[in-house]
């Protein structure tokens, strides 16, 4: 391997990675399979690709071309050298609106092409659900389709010319009429014309095998089309000329409700003569909530287009009239359509969990049959599932007869794997009996290539092998795929994981307490690799800042998987590779909500840091900022905040303090409040007013010591709404809820003083023993509150999220933790639930800012939206993460990424704000980031409302 690496470094101008991290990140795609490569190369251009092929040929090392790594059949994994085109060969070379073509490099993400084509009224026809991260090279390799294939076909239908390098270094320009054909290909076809005319099923979604029938003379001998779907086994794509189609100016969506999926499937083919853009099917067992959908147990999503909204609606209504439905709905509002389509796009991840939370896996992800036979096929498919004791949730492209499904295979035990093999063989026979294709979209890979003889017969598969030998006589390119394949039950990625649960600190309630199961949640669909955020989404800010796979949620999950496997990452919890990848995780929790399978990397990071630093000295920042509540309480007790502020304003002293504390030199140290929130509370009397419901206002560390104005404003608004406000007790023992302390002489003698804390700073730095101690002390203090029905109102979103999730998951053995978590309300939720008749003061101004990432991921912001609307605060807040994220943005080495995260959404939104707009930022980190990077003062919603009470 050393000689190979050295030779590649001499020959290639792009990056060559033979390190553990580079290899670990590419062991898997979105399939059930895992292979450990020797190294990864990110070529800069076609010359680099040629150099890699020459070196690897000399060393007899296979080469695997990889796009976005979202392949579901295993074809993006390999044991040799992996080519990563996403880093450099990702340019959109040009668009010709007149010719309706585009020239692209293989690493271009589909959405980037769509964005560039849209101003010309054009688009690329195929649109897989992974459109925000899949690459054109990967789409060509798999012959991808997507939901609009009934209108615009597969990727092969959209390819004009392909620039390809063969394994022996020949540069070919593939096209029609044998253009670019390698020597021997035409002779092979001429000798097998009869087989090519009769041996291939005639259906719109036949993706399995090589498309040799595209080389027939009556089909234009189209070498480029034949190359599509070859899964990187024939040549390496370096550039493509693709066809664009006219995008309808207006669209409408008809959602048709049926009693069951068989009814929907049987109806789909009958709608095709009406010329729809999509005919997608989905059953009720895949939909978390049927709210907003018409009545039924299954639905068809039928999209229509037109030059005007009226024309698109008329076509949708014609579809409804032609369909025999239980109920129907026509949606023309683009926002409403996006909401419905999001259900479909997330299905590939959502379907990896059964309704009861158990795991489900790909493997039979996308069989296709003639659309008129889809209903019968689905009934046979369901019967076969039942016979094997398996469960699955079919959905997909009903108009093309293509079905996606994840099945609850047991891929961890020998018996379960044997059942997986038997089921696969029997289902292949069912598909063939219905005249279908083993793959209708995602390719064969390792998942289905072994079964191709059942579909094509031995002679046609032998013809595939001969074609492979013409293109790649040395079997250098992606060996083991399509021809001479590895068994479908070999190289399973789960086989290397530990069989016994790993000893961990968090409870992982959704994964049965098993950390391995939690890591297995990441199936590789890579929604975390999107380069733009839609709506209030947050995931994954560090990837958008760096573009590095290691800084995506998927990349970190892959490294944790390899850590547990122990084959490539061999030092377990002490792994520096895992530590370095997690270092730029902001713990924003965006993946907990935005990832289709709810990977919770913030929790995994805290878990890892706890074990990694067990018994060892931690980074200085963990002591400086992890123990921030302690340092701030000491400052408050000694009343030295003015002294600290004065010292921090002396630049040389501040520089020394920042270096000792592991704080970024670019950061300003926030000023401490002269009077803490609780001291102000005691000064004003320390007791609730008379009136309505009692609410306990949580004095979080940031409100208490850094932004007491937020607490004071919240008290004013809550009391104006008729609520009685109290602070938590500060004495353990018998305490009175409602006065913030206890005046009982006996209590003063017998109880210990303390202050509540959610433990967030300890959790985020992985000091879980300390976090647990702080949380138990908090539960002791809150015992009198838990005996009442009073809600706990938390103003800082990150602290509220910690109490809602980290507290019960870390203290999973203490029932009080779940009881306190259930009491936590945000400021807006408290007003909505406990003062429903109160009308907020009218602000009547536009609002900008950012929904706090923890609020988006854990708490939800529906109540906040309604409160802003009632107050006349107009406009939408941006998504993403501010980039400061508690301690993250203050830590040395994080400043550039922190600032880049702010530039992604927050700072542009503030710069583009209309005059007089209110800048909302409920989190202390968000307000600090705005002040330090933009010189703008952000305010908590409570402050804005309190100001208008006057």
Image (cartoon, rainbow, N blue to C red):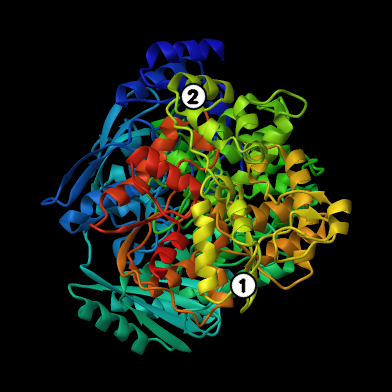
The percent position of residue 143, horizontal first and vertical second, equals 39, 50
Q: Which residue does the numbered mark 1 point to in the structure image?
A: 689
In front here: 786 or 511?
Answer: 786
Q: Residue at 35% across / 21% down in the picture? A: 48
Q: Residue at 48% across / 69% down in the picture? A: 862
At numbered mark 1, what does the secondary structure look like: helix, strand or loop? loop
* Image mark for residue 654: 2
Distance from label 1 to label 2 (Cα)? 43 Å
Whether 321 is drawn above or below 717: the answer is below
* Image mark for residue 704: none
Q: Counting other residues with Cα less than 10 Å from the Cα at mark 1, is it few (<14), some (14-19), or many (20 or more)?
A: some
At numbered mark 2, what does the secondary structure look like: helix, strand or loop? helix
In front here: 423 or 110?
Answer: 110
Instruction: Report if the CB atoms under discs 1 and 2 are less than 8 Å apart.
Output: no
Whether 695 is drawn above or below 839: the answer is above
The percent position of residue 522, horizontal first and vertical second, equals 59, 47
The percent position of residue 166, horizontal first and vertical second, equals 36, 28
The answer to whether 249 appears left or right of 524 in the picture is: left
Q: Quadrant of the N terminus?
A: top right
In front here: 597 or 301?
Answer: 597
Q: Is residue 337 visible?
A: yes
- Residue 580 quadrant: top right
Q: Is residue 203 visible?
A: no
The percent position of residue 254, horizontal first and vertical second, equals 37, 79
Whether 646 is drawn above or below 745: the answer is above
């Amino acid at each position: 391997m050393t000689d190979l690496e050295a030779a590649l470094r001499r020959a290639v101008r792009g990056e060559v990675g033979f390190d553990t991290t580079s290899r670990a990140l590419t062991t898997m795609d979105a399939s059930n399979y895992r292979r450990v490569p020797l190294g990864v190369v990110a070529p800069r251009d076609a010359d680099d690709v040629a150099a890699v092929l020459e070196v690897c040929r000399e060393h007899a090392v296979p080469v695997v071309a990889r796009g976005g790594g979202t392949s579901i059949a295993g074809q993006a994994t390999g044991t040799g050298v992996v080519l990563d085109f996403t880093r450099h060969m990702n340019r959109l070379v040009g668009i010709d609106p007149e010719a309706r073509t585009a020239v692209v490099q293989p690493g271009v993400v589909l959405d980037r092409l769509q964005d560039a084509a849209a101003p010309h009224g054009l688009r690329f026809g195929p649109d897989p659900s992974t459109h925000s991260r899949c690459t054109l090279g990967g789409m060509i390799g798999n012959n991808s389709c997507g939901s609009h294939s009934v209108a615009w076909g597969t990727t092969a239908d959209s390819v004009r010319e392909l620039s390809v390098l063969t394994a022996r270094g020949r540069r070919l320009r593939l096209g029609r009429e044998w253009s670019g054909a390698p020597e021997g290909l035409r002779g092979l076809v001429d000798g097998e014309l009869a087989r090519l005319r009769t041996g291939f099923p005639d259906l719109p979604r036949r993706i399995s095998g090589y498309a040799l029938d595209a080389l027939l003379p009556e089909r234009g001998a189209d070498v480029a089309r034949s190359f599509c779907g070859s899964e990187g086994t024939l040549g390496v794509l370096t550039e493509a000329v693709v066809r664009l189609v006219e995008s309808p100016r207006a669209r409408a969506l008809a959602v048709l409700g049926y009693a069951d999926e068989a009814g929907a499937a049987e109806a789909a083919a009958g709608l095709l003569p009406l010329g729809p853009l999509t005919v997608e099917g989905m059953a009720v067992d895949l939909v978390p909530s049927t709210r907003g959908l018409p009545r039924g147990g299954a639905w068809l999503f039928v999209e229509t287009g037109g030059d005007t909204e009226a024309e698109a609606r008329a076509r949708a209504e014609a579809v409804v009239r032609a369909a025999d439905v239980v109920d129907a709905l026509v949606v023309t509002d683009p926002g409403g359509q996006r909401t419905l389509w999001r259900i479909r796009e997330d299905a590939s991840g959502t379907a990896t969990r059964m309704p009861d939370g158990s795991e489900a896996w790909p493997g039979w992800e996308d069989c296709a049959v003639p659309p008129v036979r889809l209903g019968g096929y689905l009934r046979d498919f369901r019967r076969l599932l039942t016979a094997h004791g398996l469960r699955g949730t079919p959905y997909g492209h009903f108009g093309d007869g293509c079905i996606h499904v994840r099945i609850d295979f047991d891929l961890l035990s020998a018996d379960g794997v044997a059942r997986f093999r038997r089921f696969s063989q029997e289902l292949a026979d069912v598909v063939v009996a219905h005249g279908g294709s083993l793959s209708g979209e995602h390719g064969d890979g390792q998942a289905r290539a072994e079964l191709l003889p059942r579909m094509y017969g031995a002679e046609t598969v032998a013809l595939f092998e001969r074609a492979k030998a013409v293109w790649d006589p040395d079997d250098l390119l992606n060996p083991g795929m399509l021809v001479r394949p590895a068994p479908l039950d070999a190289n399973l990625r789960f086989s290397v994981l530990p069989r016994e649960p790993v000893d961990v600190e968090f409870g992982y309630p959704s994964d049965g307490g098993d950390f391995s199961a939690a890591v297995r949640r990441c199936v590789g669909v890579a929604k975390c690799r999107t380069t733009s955020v839609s709506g209030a989404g947050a995931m994954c800010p560090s990837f958008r800042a760096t573009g590095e796979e290691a800084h995506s949620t998927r990349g970190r999950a892959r490294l944790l998987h390899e850590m547990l496997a122990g084959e490539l990452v061999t030092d377990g919890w002490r792994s520096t590779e895992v530590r370095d990848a997690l270092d730029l995780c902001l713990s924003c929790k965006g993946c907990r909500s935005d990832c289709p399978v709810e990977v919770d990397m913030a929790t995994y990071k805290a878990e890892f840091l706890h074990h990694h630093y067990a018994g060892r000295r931690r980074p200085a920042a963990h002591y400086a900022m992890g123990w921030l509540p302690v340092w701030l309480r000491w400052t408050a007790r000694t009343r030295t905040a003015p002294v600290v502020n004065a010292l921090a304003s002396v630049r040389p002293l501040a520089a020394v303090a920042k270096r000792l504390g592991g704080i970024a030199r670019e950061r300003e140290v926030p000023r401490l409040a002269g009077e803490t929130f609780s001291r102000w509370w005691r000064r004003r009397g320390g007791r609730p007013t008379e009136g309505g419901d009692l609410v306990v206002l949580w004095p979080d560390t940031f409100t208490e010591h850094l932004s007491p104005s937020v607490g004071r404003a919240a008290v004013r608004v809550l009391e104006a709404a008729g609520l009685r406000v109290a602070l938590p007790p500060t004495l353990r023992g018998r305490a009175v809820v409602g006065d913030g302390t206890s005046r009982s002489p006996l209590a003063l003698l017998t109880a210990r003083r303390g202050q509540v804390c959610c433990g967030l700073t300890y959790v985020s730095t992985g000091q879980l023993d300390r976090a647990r101690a702080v949380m138990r002390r908090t539960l002791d203090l809150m015992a009198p509150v838990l005996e009442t029905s009073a809600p706990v109102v938390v103003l800082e979103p990150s602290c509220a999220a910690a109490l809602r999730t980290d507290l019960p998951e870390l203290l999973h053995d203490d029932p009080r933790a779940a009881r306190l978590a259930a009491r936590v309300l945000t400021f807006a939720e408290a007003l909505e639930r406990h003062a429903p008749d109160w009308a907020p003061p009218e602000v009547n101004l536009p609002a900008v800012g950012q929904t706090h990432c923890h609020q988006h991921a854990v708490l939800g912001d529906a109540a906040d939206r309604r409160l802003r609307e009632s107050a006349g605060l107009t406009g939408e807040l941006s998504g993403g993460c501010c980039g400061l994220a508690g301690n993250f943005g203050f830590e040395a080495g994080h400043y550039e990424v922190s600032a880049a995260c702010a530039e992604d959404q927050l700072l542009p939104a503030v710069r583009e704000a209309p005059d007089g707009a209110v800048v909302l930022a409920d989190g202390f980190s968000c307000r600090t980031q705005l002040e330090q990077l933009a010189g703008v003062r952000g305010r908590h919603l409570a402050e804005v409302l309190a100001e208008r009470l006057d």
